[in-house]
Each structure stands twice: as C-alpha cells, then as structure tokens.
Image (spheres, rainbow, N blue to C red):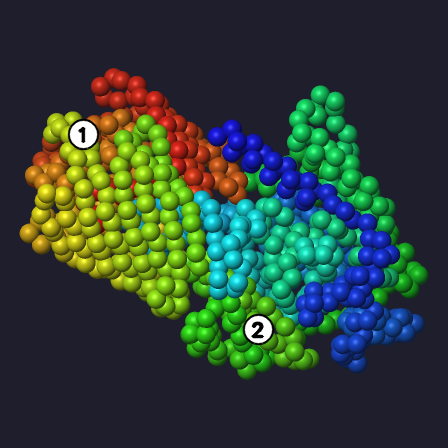
C-alpha cells in the first residue's frame, strides 16, 4: 500500500507541474516551424499563407468606418476570415483550476466587453472552446452542477466495477492489465500510454460541442484556436480546423495521466508543454487586437528550506525553476494579465468548483476599466477590425462518410445505420449521439469523429474506432478477514476468435479454493443484443453455524441471449446446467436483470441499482439471488445508503441452499453463515465522501445491518450488527476497514483489499 500511495503522489505532482506551468517562449526558429506546420489541413499554425484557401465573401458585410476598408480587406486576404472587434482572450491551463475562466467570462459579460477571438491551452482550451461555441458563463456553471467531472475524466465503466453474474462480455476494466498485444495493427506487445484513456471525456465534449456544426473554428460564434504539442517531434500545434471535440481532447492530454490523442497519425499531448499561456502565438494569429491573458500559474515559486526534504521535492522545485521564466516572458508580452488566485486548489480537485469560479470573478472585476481603456485606445488609432456580422458556421453538406479502424463487415454495418447522413446538412448533434451510442460498446475502446472540409460547402466525416487489443493478460484478487474466501487470479482475453468483434476469456483462480472460468460472447449487434456462453469449475466450501462444514466442487454451464436497454440496463434469458461432485445434475431456464441509475459506478451519490438472477432447474426449487441499493443525498456531504438482498434455494440440499453471510451480507457472519430455504438482509447507513478524484475516493460510513433466514417461509434464525466502515473504492481495486459490534456483544475488526467478484453460490 505504501508503494501504491507513493506512486499516486508522484503522478499527481507530475500532473500539477505539467498543467500549472509550461514552456511558453516561442523563439524565431519555433515560429518558422509553426508558420509552416500543417497536417492534412487539420493541425496547423495558420500564418499569412492561409490566403491560399478560398476567402470568405465580404460583399454583404457592412463596414462602420470607411477609412478602415483597406485594413479590413488586407486582414481578410491575410487570414481568410473576418474578425470581430474586441479583445483576444488567452486562457492558460491548470486542470480544474481552469474553472476560474468561467468567472472571467461572467465579468466580461456584465461589462459588455467584446471578444474577437479566444486562444486556449489544456483546461483553458476546453473552457475557451465551449465559450466560443456559444455557451455563456451561466450555462457553463449550470452544466458544471449537473455533471460529475471525476467520472467524466476517469475510465470508470458505465456498467460499474462489479459484475456479479458475469452476464456481460469480458473487459479489462475489472483487471489490472499486465500485457497487451495487437497483431491487427502490427503493434506487437504494448503497454498503456497513460493512466486514463478518458473515453467518457471525449463523449461528453462531443455532446457539449454539438450545438455548432462547423469544420473551421473561425466559423464559431467566436473564432477559436486550441494549443497542443506534437509528442513525436515536440512542435507546437495550433488546432483551428476539424472536429472541435477532438481539438479540446487533444489540448488537455496531460502526459502520463491521459493517453495521447491521435489526429492524422500524429500523437498530440497537452499544449501546456510548450505554450501554457500562448500569448505570443495569439499575437501572431490575431494582429491588431489587444491581448488579455488569464494566467493560472503561480507567481511566486519560492519555498522554505525545510519544505524540500525528498527527491520528489527536489525534482518538483527544479521543474518550477525551469518553467517560471518562460511563463513570465509570455506574461510580459500580453497587453493585460488577469491572475486568479487559485494556487491553493489542486490540478484535479474534485470539489470547491464554485470557489474556483469566484476567484476568477474576484481577479477580473478590478481589471474591467483597464480592459475598456485598451479597447478605447484601439478604436482611436484605427487598429481594431470593425465588428462584422456573420452567421456562425456554414451550411455544410456531408459528401462522404467513412469508418476506420474496424473490419469491413463492421464498417458496412455501421454505414448501413448512419449512411443516410450523406447528402444531408452537417448535423453535429446527430454525430454526437452516434459517438455516445457507439462508445457504450465494450468492443470499441475509443470512438472519435473527424470532420474534414473537402470544398467550400462539402465536408467529409471519418469516424475512427479503436478496438481493444486482440490479446490481453490481466490480474485481480481479493484478500482479507471479512470473508473466508480469498484469491489471486490471472485472466487471458482474446478477441476476434470465430468472427470479428467476438471476445473470449479464461480466468484461473488461486487461493484457499481453486476456480476456472471460461467466457465467450458474440459481437454485439446494433440492436444491442448478443449471446454469451459461461463455463466454470470451482471449489466451494463453508462452515455453517448449525449444519457443520461442507466442501464440494461445482461444475456449471450457461448459454444466454442478452439485450441492453437504456444506458446501463441489461436483460438475459437462457439455459443453465449445474452438477455437484458426488451429487445430481440439474438443468433449467435462466433469467437475469440488471438496472442501474447510479450517477457514478464507483462513488455513487444518488440513484439505485438492481441485480437479479433466477434459475429454475427441473425437479428442484427455483433459486434466486437479488441485490438492491439506493443512495439518497441528505444534507451537506452526507447521504443515506439503503441496501438489501434476497436469496431462495433448498436447505435440504446444502449446495443449493440460501446462505446468508458468505458474500459480506453481514460481516460478523462471514466465518459461520446462516443457512435456510430463503434469506434476506437489510443495510441502512449514513455515508460521507472524504475524498473524491478521477481514480476513486475515500468514504466513511456508519451502518446497521439485519439478516434473517427462513425455512418454508418461517423464521429459522436472524442476526444483527452495527459498525463503522472506511472504504476506498477505485476503478479496479477497493480497500475496506470495518469495526463491527454484533448481537452476541462481540467486536469484530475486519479488512479487505480487492473487488469481491464472487463465484460461489448455486446460480450457474
């Protein structure tokens, strides 16, 4: 655990340094590189050479000041588009500290300060891009209150970290991946390029930017540019064309934290590496406008001697020293600088967003009159471009639609579903919905839309799909004294076995009991259906309170058809067979139902979920296993948690009985569970989140639990306990420490590490 936490601290320090400060100086040589850089018309620093493209029509555009017509005409020939009058706003990166930009927008709106263009890096790029696409400060704050930022930037599965019934296709999200190999793209063995792929983030950005249908960021309500860094050669890249969501995802790709973003076979990372406050770039792009910069980097990097105590402290301070002079040079190039005081917030803070926004407000208010003077000086000297009324965007028509990264049969199926777009007007809302829909598929690890203008009125859409690696090896485990069972397992996954898009896995479990689990799932159809085959062999055992110790081996098979409905809901129907060593074989129909409305699969604050499995073997009673949970926000940081479960079986056949306590239903019964024909348990708790981040968080909970087993629906035995728990849930790991007081008047101290992916029980 100490090593784990040291690693997390190191990652966070690196992220903070990369985002909060950067190399901002642009030398003459760098400018020459930038001025000529262009990757298939998508990645570019647009210099005066932009005049080679078709200029926009100016004939219908009125001019307020006739003496400026030559200046206007010259500008349009140089840049190929029409600027508004006003300031050029430059927004720096800073992680969640960048939410202070919303406060800046708010004050500029109140003062009616016109914005001619926005240039942003990292979080400044995201905030600037959304604002440039038509959102105002109030709308951005409203959206911020409605979303879970930590879930969006994380890789948390939409189906949750725990798959109790193994009713979904194998996925690496429940394992710590050790090895990946992909022969489909000749990549060979490979590792992760970042801790987070941020699949959810791109989907969210696609939805947020869907209100504007443009292929050129100059056509936005406010012209916009995002800054990224070419990871392959270190060049600064200015993104001004293509898909706005892709540009925003690229500009905030913090190296080591987020995987690089690929555009036209070029890996892009956070623009803050070279230009966290891109003032010099903005002046080159948008001449004749005053530049107002919003700088989130620390002004004072000095530290006390006693605070530098480790190699990490030395490395952190050294990087700050290297970067601070670069920031200062860009600050000096700005006409005016707004500096919100946000140094006391973290780069990936999970709360306090209103306070961060307010810091932006506080920093901007005293600068409003100075900004107005800048605009006045600009108008007096005829150096500003007059305001030009123009429609945001163009009536672009989709001339072609292609799908890349998938086999031909999958591409053809996708085209059959979305091919009607060809010949129609470009609709980014439809495109965002398609991205959202396709991103839910577990066989697509990434879905990205790329728009490329092929003529003045035509645009081509390329939807690039990245699939999970063909071969994958991962591990998981569970250990502690809360449950009698503990294990370490290794799982191998293989894709495209019998057909393109299918997936199979084989998991071998070691521990106090062995287990072998094989799964195979067909490719999901575009009606969200698929077939799944599950085969298992495992050793089971328990020591009941009144029926002694039982040890046996269980062999089972299940074939089912599954249908997804809604975002996180799944229904299954099939047939299952089970045999116990030295026992009878039972078989019969199988049903499953999963409903999930939780707002976060790892750290829910509201919503409910239900998981239910029913197996009705012939010549035996029906066996069920259902779990329910409900999270209700109450006051401040607290919430009420309600959980419960129901099991049915046959106590006369111990291998198919309803057992209470062997799956953490009641912690103090884990060593000696209760057995009956029916069993139910209830949990009521008051929980508070102590820490929340992209990797998970820490919760503290006061709880009470009650359970009862019945025979022939008559009370047989019951149990209650109360206690306190400290939990640390993450994407593919969970830690828990508990203290319990039970009805026998005894205290139990318990702990566990790992996600309890149970195999035991009568349900095949």
Q: Position of residue 208 (x, y in %)?
A: 57, 59
Above or below, comparing residue 514 to residue 612 in the picture = above
For label 1, the SS is: strand
Q: Position of residue 628 (x, y in %)?
A: 29, 44
Q: Can the viewer see residue 42?
A: yes
Question: Distance of mark 1 from mark 2, alpha carbons?
Answer: 62 Å
Closer to the camera in the image, 647 or 366: 647
Q: Is residue 508 left or right of residue 352?
A: left
Q: In this view, does 163 lie to the left or right of 339?
A: left
Q: Which of marks 1 and 2 is in front?
A: 1
**Residue drawn at 27 percent across, 18 percent down:** 746
Q: Residue furthest top?
A: 745
Classed neighbour count for the residue bearing mark 1: other residues with Cα under 10 Å, few (<14), some (14–19), many (≥20): some
Q: Mark 1 points at which residue?
A: 543
Above or below, comparing residue 487 to residue 132 in the picture = above
**Residue drawn at 37 percent across, 60 percent down:** 503
Q: Where is residue 47 in the image (x, y as percent from the top left)?
A: 81, 66
Classed neighbour count for the residue bearing mark 2: other residues with Cα under 10 Å, few (<14), some (14–19), many (≥20): many
Q: Can the viewer see residue 713?
A: no
Q: How many labels does the image show?
A: 2
Q: Is residue 441 left or right of residue 278?
A: left
**Residue drawn at 54 percent across, 46 percent down:** 195
Above or below, comparing residue 171 to residue 482 in the picture = below
Closer to the camera in the image, 283 or 15: 15
The label on residue 461 is 2
First reached walking from the N terminus: tag 1 or tag 2: 2
**Residue drawn at 13 percent across, 54 percent down:** 587
For label 2, the SS is: strand
Q: Position of residue 577 (x, y in %)?
A: 17, 54
């Amino acid at each position: 655990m100490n090593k784990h936490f040291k690693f997390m601290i190191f990652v966070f320090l690196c992220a903070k340094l990369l985002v909060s400060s950067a190399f901002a100086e642009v030398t003459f040589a760098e400018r020459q590189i930038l001025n000529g850089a262009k990757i298939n018309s998508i990645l570019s620093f647009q210099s005066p050479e932009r005049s080679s493209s078709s200029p926009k029509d100016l004939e219908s555009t009125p001019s307020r000041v006739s003496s400026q017509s030559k200046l206007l005409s010259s500008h349009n020939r140089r840049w190929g588009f029409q600027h508004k009058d006003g300031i050029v706003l430059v927004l720096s990166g800073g992680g969640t500290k960048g939410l202070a930009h919303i406060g800046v927008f708010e004050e500029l709106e109140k003062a009616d300060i016109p914005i001619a263009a926005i240039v942003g890096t990292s979080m400044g790029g995201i905030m600037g891009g959304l604002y440039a696409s038509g959102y105002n400060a109030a709308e951005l704050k409203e959206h911020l209150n409605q979303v879970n930022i930590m879930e969006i930037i994380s890789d948390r599965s939409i189906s949750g970290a725990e798959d109790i019934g193994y009713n979904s296709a194998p996925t690496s999200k429940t394992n710590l991946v050790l090895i990946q190999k992909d022969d489909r793209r000749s990549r060979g063995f490979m590792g992760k390029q970042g801790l987070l792929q941020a699949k959810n983030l791109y989907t969210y950005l696609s939805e947020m930017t869907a209100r504007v249908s443009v292929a050129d960021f100059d056509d936005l309500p406010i012209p916009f540019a995002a800054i990224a860094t070419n990871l392959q050669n270190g060049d600064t890249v200015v993104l001004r064309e293509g898909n706005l969501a892709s540009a925003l995802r690229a500009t905030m790709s913090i190296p080591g934290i987020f995987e690089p973003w690929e555009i036209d076979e070029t890996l892009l990372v956070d623009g803050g590496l070279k230009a966290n406050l891109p003032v010099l770039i903005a002046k080159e792009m948008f001449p004749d406008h005053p530049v107002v910069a919003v700088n989130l980097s620390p002004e004072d990097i000095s530290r006390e001697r006693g605070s530098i105590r480790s190699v990490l402290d030395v490395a952190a301070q050294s990087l700050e020293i290297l970067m601070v002079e670069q920031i200062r040079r860009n600050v000096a190039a700005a006409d005016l600088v707004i500096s919100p005081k946000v140094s006391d917030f973290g780069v990936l803070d999970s709360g306090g967003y209103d306070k961060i926004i307010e810091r932006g407000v506080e920093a901007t208010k005293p600068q409003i009159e100075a900004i107005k003077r800048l605009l006045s000086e600009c108008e007096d000297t005829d150096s500003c471009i007059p305001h030009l009324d123009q429609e945001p965007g163009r009536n672009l028509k989709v001339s072609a639609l292609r799908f890349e990264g998938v086999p031909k049969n999958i591409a053809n199926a996708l085209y059959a579903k979305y091919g009607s777009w060809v010949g129609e007007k470009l609709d980014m809302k439809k495109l965002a919905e398609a991205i959202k829909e396709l991103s839910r598929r577990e066989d697509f690890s990434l879905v990205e839309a790329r728009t490329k203008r092929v003529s003045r009125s035509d645009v081509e859409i390329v939807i690039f799909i990245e699939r999970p690696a063909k071969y994958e090896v991962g591990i998981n485990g569970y250990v502690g004294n809360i449950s009698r069972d503990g294990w370490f397992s290794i799982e191998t996954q293989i894709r495209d076995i019998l057909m393109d898009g299918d997936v199979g896995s084989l998991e071998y479990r070691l521990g106090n009991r062995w287990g072998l689990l094989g799964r195979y799932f067909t490719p999901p159809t575009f009606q969200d259906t698929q077939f799944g085959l599950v085969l298992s062999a495992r050793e089971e055992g328990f020591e009941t309170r009144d029926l002694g110790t039982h040890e046996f081996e269980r062999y089972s098979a299940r074939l089912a058809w599954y249908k997804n409905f809604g975002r996180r809901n799944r229904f299954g129907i099939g047939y299952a067979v089970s045999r116990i060593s030295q026992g009878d074989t039972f078989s019969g129909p199988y049903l499953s139902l999963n409903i999930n409305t939780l707002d976060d699969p790892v750290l829910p604050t509201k919503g409910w979920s239900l998981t239910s499995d029913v197996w009705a073997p012939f010549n035996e009673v029906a066996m069920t296993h259902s779990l329910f949970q409900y999270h209700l926000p109450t006051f401040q940081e607290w919430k009420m948690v309600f959980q419960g479960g129901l099991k049915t079986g046959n106590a006369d056949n111990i291998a198919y009985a309803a057992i209470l306590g062997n799956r953490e239903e009641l912690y103090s019964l884990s060593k000696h569970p209760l057995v009956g024909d029916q069993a139910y348990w209830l949990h009521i708790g008051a929980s508070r989140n102590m820490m929340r981040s992209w990797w998970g968080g820490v919760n503290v909970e006061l709880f009470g639990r009650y359970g009862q087993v019945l025979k022939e629906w008559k009370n047989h035995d019951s149990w209650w306990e109360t206690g306190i728990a400290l939990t640390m849930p993450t994407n593919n790991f969970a830690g828990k420490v508990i203290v319990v007081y039970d009805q026998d008047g005894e205290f139990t101290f318990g702990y566990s590490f790992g996600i309890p992916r149970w195999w035991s029980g009568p349900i095949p």
